[in-house]
Image: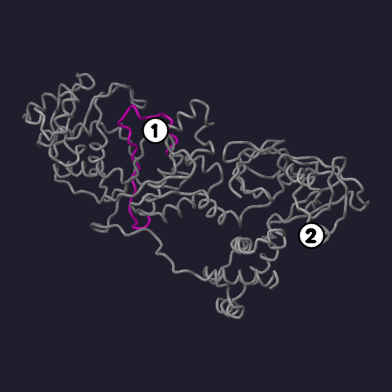
């Protein structure tokens, strides 16, 4: 079977399997995966794939199927039964109304774990034409960082998360005080002045503390004195089942004193609600119908249910999903901040972190996160996101968009000797994109010297192996010189030469690529890259995809995305 027939069969298969629309990048991936020997000549594969994909896409669906049947198809790529796509349906929808909330704590920028909650809520909002509340939950002054009030909206904007209503809980403390009094008045809560250690012993033994029997009047008197008390002197507790099998559920704390100054509102208040109290009040008043949260909140959902019942409020539908992990990346906000403060990380967008801004800076598209989160869904099983999966999805998006350029890592200058006169001044034209001729060409002007990758230079030197500079000339490398050996690709292939990228030395642009481990690879890129702008995606041939991070007159900085 010749290479053209092989690629044609893969292209037909890809078209039939994907709605009769064939994608060049997918076909190239299939060919390279199943036929490793074809990786030696990627340009030929790319050119043939582009031509044959265009041919396949010009056929009608019936013609594509007929052509594939005549060629026998490709057994290993026949479609497997598809899993149901999309999120599971929400239950207990009343009056066709769905209202959800994304409620981050402002301890720092969002990471991919937060993105799961935000994206799930956004997807359900769209699915049911519902509404989404953004609520910044900042009622613990010890866990609030001022920069988060700016970074969280920025991250949500990049994720294309649109909230219909926005609240900050530190603006609503008087609301929580109002409902604390109502909870006391209806007998749902009581002021507790027990020592914390003593209360724990009683609670663990399923015994009520003496304060539980206070009258409403006694509790209101203590509540009114609450602002003048010291931290830890008293708390407001919600009554639950004192014999509940889970000690954490028993008479949980609703309000406490915090003397630390709040980063946003200063020392205006000293009494702050615990999360379970403020969240229950807000979810009710804001009309939240469905609460999406991690399974680590199962106990909190049960705690909150007690308060709902005390107030005779409708309990929202709680949906708990499993933990989300990410391979080899730091997701803990506190550990990330500690690392930034001690210099381990360069900032919240350090490529070693799992923050949204770090992922974005590397050139990962938000569509990848949406596809991943929708696929994982709301199941309670824990899930791990692999970089391999992220890279594969991202490659499908950027493959068809990105221009190609030669980047020379750790560049070595070679002055080529014995060049024929007609090879001493050459202009090489290469496609900006192998499948989109309308994008135009890059031009490389060769005058006898070039930058080549240090690794290729050293391998050729150590193994006495011939090199071919793509679309240019073939050379031999030894300790004394680099010598011209010919200009034909066929000669290079016959001699098993390594085909490498190169840059003219006369107009190459100094470049740096920041790698995923935050190391830097310095080198040169061809001069036609001088029109690149920040956020452009490129494919550095034989190196990988990268995002343009900074452009100066004499240097371009990239962040490596993936191969």
Q: Does label 1 or label 2 sit earlier along the sequence?
A: 1
Q: Is residue 513 magenta?
A: no
* Residue 67 sits above or below residue 327 on the image: below
Residue 32 relative to residue 492: left or right? left
Left or right of 489, for residue 417: right
Task: Bin the neighbour count of mark 1 within 10 Å (Cα to Cα): few under 14, some 14-19, many 20 and up.
Answer: many
Magenta residues (range)? 126-152
Indicate the quadrant containing the N terminus: top left, top right, bottom left or bottom right: bottom right
Whole-number angstrom distance, CA of label 1 to CA of label 2 = 58 Å
Please tell me whether mark 1 or mark 2 is closer to you in this view: 2
Q: Quadrant of residue 150?
A: top left
Question: Would you say the residues marked 1 and 2 are in contact, meaning their CB atoms lie under 8 Å apart?
Answer: no
Farthest right residue in view = 421
> What residue does disc 1 label?
107
State left or right for residue 185 relative to residue 487: left
Residue plotted at (65% across, 50% down): 539
Could you tell me residue 307's position as x and y percent? 17, 41
Q: Secondary structure at mark 1?
A: loop
Image coordinates for residue 83, horizontal then vertical, percent: 41, 64
Q: Is residue 451 above or below residue 185?
A: below
Q: Secondary structure at mark 2?
A: helix
Mark 2 = which residue?
A: 493
């Amino acid at each position: 079977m010749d290479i053209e027939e092989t690629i044609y069969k893969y292209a037909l298969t890809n078209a039939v399997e994907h709605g009769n629309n064939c994608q060049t990048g997918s076909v190239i991936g299939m060919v390279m995966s199943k036929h490793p020997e074809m990786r030696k000549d990627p340009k030929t594969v790319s050119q043939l794939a582009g031509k044959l994909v265009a041919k396949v896409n010009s056929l009608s669906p019936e013609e594509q199927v007929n052509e594939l049947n005549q060629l026998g198809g490709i057994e290993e790529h026949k479609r497997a039964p598809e899993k149901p796509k999309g999120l599971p349906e929400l239950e207990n929808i009343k009056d066709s109304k769905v209202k959800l909330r994304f409620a981050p704590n402002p301890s720092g920028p969002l990471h991919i774990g937060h993105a799961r909650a935000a994206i799930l809520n956004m997807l359900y909002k769209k699915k049911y034409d519902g509404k989404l509340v953004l609520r910044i939950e900042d009622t613990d002054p010890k866990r609030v960082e001022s920069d988060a009030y700016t970074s969280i909206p920025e991250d949500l904007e990049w994720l294309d998360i649109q909230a219909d209503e926005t609240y900050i809980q530190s603006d609503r403390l008087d609301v929580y005080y109002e409902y604390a009094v109502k909870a006391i008045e209806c007998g749902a809560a009581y002021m507790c002045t027990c020592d914390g250690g003593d209360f724990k012993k009683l609670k663990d033994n399923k015994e009520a503390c003496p304060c539980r029997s206070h009258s409403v009047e006694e509790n209101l008197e203590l509540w009114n004195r609450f602002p003048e008390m010291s931290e830890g002197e008293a708390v407001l507790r919600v009554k639950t089942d004192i014999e509940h099998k889970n000690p954490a559920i028993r008479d949980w704390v609703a309000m406490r004193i915090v003397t630390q100054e709040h980063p946003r509102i200063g020392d205006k208040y000293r009494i702050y609600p615990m999360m379970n109290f403020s969240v229950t009040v807000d979810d009710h008043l804001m009309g939240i119908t469905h609460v999406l949260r991690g399974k680590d909140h199962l106990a909190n959902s049960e705690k909150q249910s007690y308060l709902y019942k005390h107030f005779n409020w409708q309990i929202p539908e709680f949906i708990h999903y499993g933990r989300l992990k990410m391979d080899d990346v730091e997701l803990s906000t506190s550990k990330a901040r500690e690392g930034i403060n001690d210099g381990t990380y360069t900032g919240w967008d350090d490529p070693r972190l799992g923050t949204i801004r770090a992922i974005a800076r590397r050139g990962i598209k938000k569509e990848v996160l949406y596809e991943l989160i929708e696929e994982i869904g709301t199941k309670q099983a824990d899930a791990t996101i692999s970089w391999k999966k992220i890279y594969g999805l991202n490659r499908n998006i950027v493959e068809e968009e990105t221009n190609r350029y030669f980047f020379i890592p750790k560049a070595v200058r070679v002055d080529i000797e014995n060049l024929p006169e007609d090879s001493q001044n050459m202009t090489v034209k290469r496609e900006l994109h192998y499948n989109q001729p309308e994008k135009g060409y890059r031009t490389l002007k060769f005058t006898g010297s070039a930058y080549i990758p240090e690794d290729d230079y050293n391998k050729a030197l150590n193994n006495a192996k011939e090199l071919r500079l793509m679309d240019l000339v073939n050379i031999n490398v030894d300790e004394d010189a680099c010598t011209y050996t010919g200009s034909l690709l066929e000669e290079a292939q016959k001699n098993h030469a390594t085909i490498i990228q190169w840059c003219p030395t006369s107009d190459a642009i100094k470049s740096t690529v920041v790698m995923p481990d935050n190391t830097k690879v310095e080198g040169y890129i061809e001069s036609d890259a001088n029109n690149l702008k920040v956020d452009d995606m490129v494919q550095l041939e034989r190196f990988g995809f990268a995002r343009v991070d900074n452009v100066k007159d004499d240097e371009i900085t990239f962040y490596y995305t993936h191969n």
